[in-house]
Amino acid sequence: MQGFVEDIFQSLHRVEQRRWAQAYLWSLIHGSGKKTPRRMARADSLPAAAVRGLHQFINASPWEWQPVRRRLAERVTAGAAPYAWSVAELIIPKNGDHSVGVHDRVDPATGQPVNCQRALGLFLAVDNQSFPVDWSLVLSGPWDWDPQRRQRARIPEEEKERPVGAYVLDYAANVVTLPHAAGLPWVLDLTRCDDAAGVLAGLARERLDVVCEVDPGQVVLVGQHTPTVSTVGAIMEMRHARQPHVMVRQTPDGRTKVVPIHAYAGTVRLPQLGAGADGASRTYRILERPAPEGRLPARYWITSLTDLPVDEVLSLVRGRTAALSTVSVLQNRFGVLDFEGRSFPGWHHHMTMASAAHLYQYLDGVSGNAPVRSGTPVTEPSRTAS
């Protein structure tokens, strides 16, 4: 673990900071229950002073999280062959209104109001795994305009309320210099995104390939010389315009499952990319998974990978599935729901540590059912990180 910490946290120049990083990382991986400084120190039988040290490292130590996250991404790409980027949402329920970014919203999955923090994670997909390499906290309401609340939470001036799509495009802009991963396709679920068209247009301007699930009402342009406006759902209702395909999948119990797929015989364009705009000539293919026996709605994807076979395109969707699975692991194992501090930097520090813990456990091959190792992970630092 010490070698991993020295590598991933090399941007932390103080030895004490890296020691506390190792202690926090160890506790996230091997501790049980809620992952708060007090409980983690108790689980690892650290001295009472360690509680303050862990708390200071996360909430007060002024280390930058972006270099650490970039190093996480570099470590993933160095040891494997990633195939896609994906973005997943994380809803963190909260009591009260003091936690940074907490606000009331309606959960789109349940339709029920929830008091929560809303976060977005950027994930890099490798095989059947997915690794978080960046995080954003979506600000809303007073967290955007109340100067006192923002000052108490130490929210940087440039952090303002933005639509979710803006975060996705920022992620895309930030990874363009990442070796072996900058040009990977983006696999997204835009069915609940208020600005799905803007996200697609923004990625097109960056010449990035996409495999995005969209709502049947997604507007597209059909035809070359005199294009007409239509929707994804309307196009796929025209039987003569679609081609049948099948995907063969293995179920968890080892059985073979045949999944019917419809592909639009032609291509479409995006109305947001007008004449003369970058990416205006880019064409897309529409794919549909029909409703199985009428029990569920049909699903639709739009992709710029028009030359790839249908099964290869949709196989990339496993990157999105892997990201959702990783979110569940981060919740249950690495405490992404447990941060109790109230500062913006503290939240980002905790999420960065959870991401590092997830990657370390994967690289180390630690089983989810492995017993907790005995002994203290590191020599307790002589003073708190600051």
Image (cartoon, helix red, strand yellow):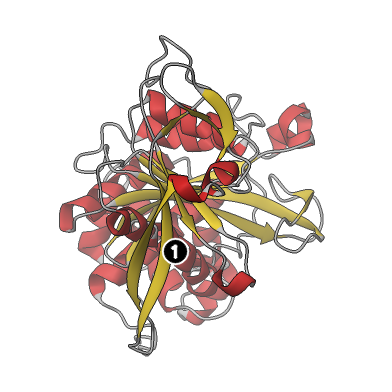
Inspect this view and state whether residue 57 appears: no
Quadrant hosting residue 4: bottom left
Residue located 40% across and 19% down the image: 280
* Residue at the front extreme of this rendering: 240
Tell me residue 103's x, y (percent): 77, 47
Camera sees residue 33: yes
Frontmost residue, 211 versus 66:
211
Identified by mark 1, the residue type is Thr
Q: Residue 165: where, in percent of width, then height?
A: 56, 36
Q: Position of residue 160 (x, y in %)?
A: 64, 29
Residue position for label 1: 321
- Taking the image as shown, residue 301 lies to the left or right of residue 52, namely left
- Is residue 361 shown above or below 54? below
Q: Position of residue 376 (x, y in %)?
A: 36, 78
> Would you identify the image quadrant in which residue 299 lies?
bottom right
Q: Answer few, some or many: residues within 10 Å of disc 1's Cα (few below 14, many 20 plus, some between 14 and 19).
A: some
Q: Determine the secondary structure under disc 1.
A: helix
Give whichever of 325, 1 is nearer the camera.
Answer: 325
Instruction: Point out the image quarter for the N terminus.
Output: bottom left
Query: In the displayed structure, does residue 129 sit left or right of residue 240?
Result: left
Q: Residue at x 48, y 17 (%)?
A: 226
Q: Is residue 352 above or below residue 175?
A: below
